[in-house]
Amino acid sequence: MEQYKNFYKGKTVLVTGGAGAIGSNLTQALAELGARMVIVLDDLSSAQEWNIPSFSNVLFAKGDILDEVKLKRVFFEKPDCVFHLAAFFANQNSVDHPERDLMINGRGTLKLLEYSVLSGVEKFIYASSGCSIYGSNAPLPLKEEFMSMHLSTPYQITKMLGELYCNFFQHHYNLRIVKTRFFNSYGPGEIPGQYRNVIPNFIYWAMRGEVLPITGTGEETRDFTYVGDIVEGLLRAGFFEEAVGKEMNLASGREIKIVDLARMIKNLIGSNSDISFVNKRKWDTKSRLLASVEKAKELIGYQPNIPFEEGLKNTISWFKKNWANISNGVQFGPGVSSAVRDIYVKSK
């Protein structure tokens, strides 16, 4: 076993947002690597309890990262390492609910950093968003050195704020911080819904034979990253000393057109769903996304290795296996997103 995997044996690790797609897969990996305890803190606002891996060394604490009682409970266990994945996700949700976004992504991150200092956490790994903080005018491929003040949603602003708070706590309190920037993650464990990502929603609608709505022309590209590759990157980021104080992209380093994505999902499922096109949302200003992963390769040996079609097959297989739980938990509630969804459905 590689050295960075042995690192977690016997350790106590806190994973905020541990019921989500990345968090649940990270929790399972840590439990299987022999962590003494993996503490999952999640309010289940965008995930389901059945998605949390069931291991004797996994402790689930239901609550959000603003809950002082729950924070005291989980930090009482003296975690050696914190993976802060919990967030008010994502762009449209933050546009609809900007104050809640600020409280969770801003104040919630601040509280976790404060508790980490008080309890003597050895390392704090922050999940930032490369899709957000680079703005719409950054040159491709996106590199860590480029920063933008021209952000278009509250979510983008608060993910940047989280990085800035991390910088402060590192410089002022010597908290050992690693900032990881995710790009369009997908894979087993992500439940579809009103504010979720395009891949789980497309799979859900395709399995039901519903229309697959594309905002824009379909020629837009994204850097879709398989959850297993992100988990591998996080495990490495928590181990390598070279990563401390640094920020790095965790991405696939390839572009996929949204229309090609829709067609691939249809073909893999054997769905007769139509594809429709509607106007972009006002905040959706990026026609292309492509990340450089050279810095992560250099610092932590990160190497994404799951081919896109294989990742989609794995995700569809997970959907089929968990269809009863998924279909019972899907919510497309009121709000701007659901109003637009109504247009999608009527266009079929």
Image: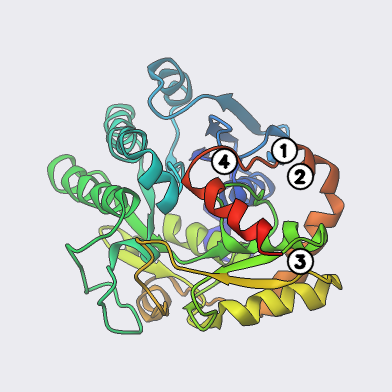
The residue shown at (54%, 48%) is 339
Residue 138: image x %, image y %? 26, 78
Among the two numbered marks 3 and 4 on one chain, the one whose residue lies closer to the N terminus: 4
Residue 107 pos. (x, y %): 28, 33
Q: Position of residue 68 (x, y in %)?
A: 38, 18
* Mark pair 3, 4: CA separation: 20 Å
Q: Are marks 2 and 1 in contact (CB under 8 Å)?
A: yes
Specify the label residue 329 is tagged with: 1
Q: Residue at x 19, y 64 (%)?
A: 150
Label 4 or label 2, whichever comes before in sequence order: 4
Q: CA distance from mark 3 to mark 1?
A: 20 Å
Q: Quadrant of the N terminus?
A: bottom right
Q: Given this view, does label 3 or label 4 mark the residue nearer the observer?
A: 3
The residue tagged 4 is 18
User: What residue sits 52% from the left and 40% below the top?
Assistant: 17
Judge from the rendering whether residue 97 lies leftward or rightward of residue 183; answer left or right: left
Judging from the image, what secondary structure is the residue with disc 3 in?
helix
Sort mark 1 into few (<14), some (14-19) or many (20+) by Cα contacts within 10 Å.
Answer: some
Q: Amino acid at mark 3?
A: Asn
Q: Looking at this view, is 314 or 289 the one in front?
A: 289
> What number is the disc on residue 140?
none
For badge 1, the amino acid type reads Gly
Residue with the mark numbered 2: 326
Along the viewing direction, whichever of 301 and 25 lies nearer the viewer: 25
Q: How far apart, in angstroms, are the residues tagged by discs 3 and 2?
A: 16 Å
Q: Nearer the viewer, mark 1 or mark 4?
A: 1
In the rendered image of this protein, does residue 143 appear above or below residue 50?
below
Residue marked by disc 3? 314
Viewer-side label of 3, 2: 2
